[in-house]
Amino acid sequence: MDSMIRQFYEIPGRIVTLKGGEYLFHEGDHAKYFYFVRSGQIFITKFAESGRVLSLRLATKGSIIGELPLFEETPIYIFNAVAQSQSEVYAIEFPTLHSYLEKKPALAINLLKIIGMHMRKQHSKFRDLLLYGKKGAIYSTLIRFANSYGREIDGGILITVPLTNQELANYSATARESLNRMLSNLRRQNVIDMRDGLIFIRDINFLKREIQCENCGREICNIE
Amino acid sequence: MDSMIRQFYEIPGRIVTLKGGEYLFHEGDHAKYFYFVRSGQIFITKFAESGRVLSLRLATKGSIIGELPLFEETPIYIFNAVAQSQSEVYAIEFPTLHSYLEKKPALAINLLKIIGMHMRKQHSKFRDLLLYGKKGAIYSTLIRFANSYGREIDGGILITVPLTNQELANYSATARESLNRMLSNLRRQNVIDMRDGLIFIRDINFLKREIQCENCGREICNIE
DNA sequence: GGGTGTAAGTGATAATAATCACACGGCTAA
DNA sequence: TTAGCCGTGTGATTATTATCACTTACACCC
């Protein structure tokens, strides 16, 4: 994936630095830039009127952000992008990107590949959620975080991103309490464990079995 | 959207005719062709081990089909495509499409626009489903069918595609009985009605209000 | 050390949705 | 004409998930 991004560096743009908690943009903002992440992590979220928050991605190095309004007549961001930790993104103005896409078919094809990949991620998430309820949503979220931010140690996988119960619940559109109970159960079953506030997955295959994981590969089954 | 498709006609391909109920491809098949629909309607579905069926789209004139495996190393269709009624599609081999995309940036950009649109549709569906449960799923499905296949008559909207309860349930990943009860309630509240086996929506704004519809427009909020 | 704030954990209850079981009506083919 | 099939409709029950109301744990600050 990283090789796909390299091409975007040839396009004039500027580097933006964000502190943890700082917003890159809010949903509803007029959209002017296409971004990709150089370092750090960026939460992609959506607010619901009720005050609930839906988390969609946690973008990391090599991820693109803000591509959806690219071809809209009145481009508006439909999500929020907020830095989880100190982050750096590369910002390219839409008109600049347009002109490069028109000149360089290879670039357009690259973008097609990336967006196609996103589409597949989205579909696989959709499936997990619709066919296996909240259990599907939560287990799938854990597996995706493990694929994106997991470090293999002691025969298990440590998710190296600190996540509160509420944050995890937002990724699976679940009530915090429900998520908490699910995690407690998994802990009781020795499937997961906590290590210094991080989630340690002992038996990822248990999670995969339960949601009839199609083993679609880390390129698809991730949270980026 | 139709104007976006016109360009694909310049690419060599062949016309495939399907009878109602005939499969264009099955999930798991080796993928060789990119298609777009010339006439008729094509169901896009996915099977679950349990025997459940998840319906994703009902493609119609101008819709593209089978674009997801386009850039995969070992292209496999991940959905089924089955004709709802007599249909005609235009089939372009992947390598042919690749070479045209490389030569014609405008074509690549067009495809980007179309796939970007699909992504937005998918996101809006996701939102409806995750934030408003089965009610969200069902009302959203009705609104999308109305936008794609609705004919305005008598101050309401007639969905011109015949759909069984089971088929509708598949679009919202709901049990047939649950869907049936929801429709019965809507009928009791005079929101919908049946006319010769077709669904007639009297008060689409009721449905929109209930799921806090963001009025994203027919380009996004449809089932194609 | 005590106060404050935030996150985790949990019981009780309510709301939502699935499942099971079966009745009914319309259509069709023998 | 009748049996069989398919889709619809509905009651009863169970399973799943959200909500409310609290307690506990822990970090941080003055």
Image: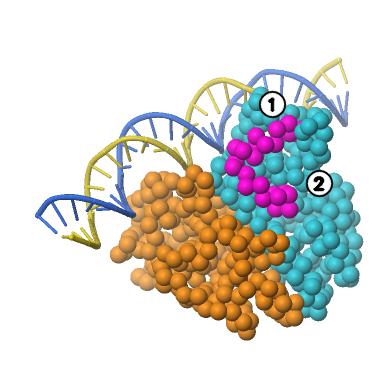
Chain colours: A orange, B cyan, C blue, D yellow
Amino acid tagged 2: Gln
Amino acid tagged 1: Asn
**Please, is residue A155 above or below residue B133 in the view?**
below
- Residue A189 x, y percent position in the rendering: 36, 52
Q: Mark yes or no: residue A150 visible.
A: no
Q: Quadrant of residue D4?
A: top right
Q: D17 and D21: which one is in front? A: D21
**Please, is residue B198 above or below residue A49 in the view?**
above
Q: B9 and A45: which one is in front? A: A45
* Tag 2 residue: B84
Which range is magenta? Answer: B198-222
Q: Secondary structure at mark 2?
A: loop
**Please, is residue C9 above or below residue B74 in the view?**
above
Q: Residue at x 81, y 52 (%)?
A: B60
**Please, is residue B189 above or below residue B213 in the view?**
above
Q: Quadrant of residue B66?
A: bottom right
**Subunit that carries the residue with mark 1:** B
* Tag 1 residue: B190
Tag 1: Cα neighbours inside 10 Å, few (<14), some, or many (≥20)?
A: few
Q: Residue at x 63, y 27 (%)?
A: B185
- Residue A65 x, y percent position in the rendering: 57, 68
- Residue A212 x, y percent position in the rendering: 55, 54
Q: A78 and B79: which one is in front? A: A78
- Residue B85 x, y percent position in the rendering: 85, 46
Q: Secondary structure at mark 1?
A: loop
